[in-house]
Amino acid sequence: MKKPASTSTAPQTWWQWVLVYPGLILGLLGSVPTVVEASRSWLHEVPFGTAAGAEQRARLFAKNTACLELIASTERSVHLPDATIVQALPCDTGDIMIRVEPPAADPIIHWVPREQLLKTVATGPSMAANATEVAQAGNRPVAVLCVVRQPRGMIVRRLRLADGTCIEEVINSYTGTVTRKPGTVACAC
């Protein structure tokens, strides 16, 4: 009499065990970051995938509590055509607080951390030399004389300094880098 064929899905030979259990373990380990993110999102009551940003915002609010008292001033606000009010305030910590108040919704506060600002700063040798030269002279820009858009995302600003001389800055609108042309330029646009 013949033995009936086994219909069990359990591994029958050693090589089946070698393939099944490591695959199962790797699958479970791979889901750990998802479970951690889901629990952090649930804990902070934010959408899935935004827990890290929410935690960073909470740290910035805690770090800049004194700055929250200053934002109420309406003299530092911009009123947009759609009646949205935008306020930006640099805090003593170097972080920037941005408060946006849409016309038919509750206001929201966004933060630009100081570290993020410093990461985006790209100083080349010529810019560093010019910045040092301006700083040593005690000259700070006091007026923007003109702003001209150029091809390929470049913007040229001509600035009057405290001592009456003028300089030119070239801003790359894609990277945010600012390069000062060496020396002074004519103050006419």
Image (cartoon, rainbow, N blue to C red):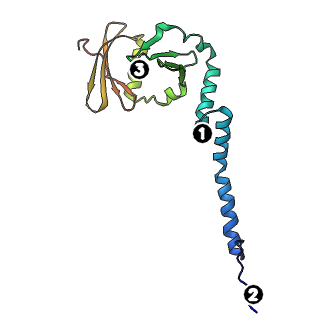
**Left or right for 32, reference 165:** right
In the drawing, does residue 114 fall left or right of residue 166?
A: right
Q: Please identify the quarter of the rendering in which residue 144 is found.
A: top left
Residue 125's spot in the image, x, y percent? 40, 29
Please name the residue that numbered disc 1 is placed on. 48
What number is the disc on residue 3? 2
The amino acid beneath tag 3 is Ala
Is residue 146 or residue 65 the one in the foreground?
65
* Residue where numbered disc 3 is placed: 131
Q: Secondary structure at mark 2?
A: loop
- Asked whether, in this view, residue 118 is left or right of residue 158, the answer is right
Say whether marks 1 and 3 touch (CB < 8 Å).
no
Give the quadrant of residue 57: top right
Quadrant, the N terminus: bottom right
Q: Check disc 1 and report its element: helix, strand or loop.
A: loop
In front of the other: 117 or 6: 6
Q: Residue at x 57, y 15 (%)?
A: 92
Q: Earlier in the sequence, mark 1 or mark 3?
A: 1
Compared with 13, 185 (above or below) is above
Q: Give the mark, 2 or 1, whose residue is nearer the N terminus.
A: 2
Q: CA distance from mark 3 to mark 2?
A: 89 Å
Q: CA distance from mark 1 to mark 3?
A: 43 Å
Question: Is the residue under label 2 in contact with that under label 3 (CB below 8 Å)?
Answer: no
Q: Nearer the viewer, mark 2 or mark 1?
A: 2
**Could you tell me residue 75's position as x and y percent?**
47, 7
| Residue lying at 40% horizontally and 28% vertically, measured from the top left | 176
Q: Earlier in the sequence, mark 3 or mark 2?
A: 2
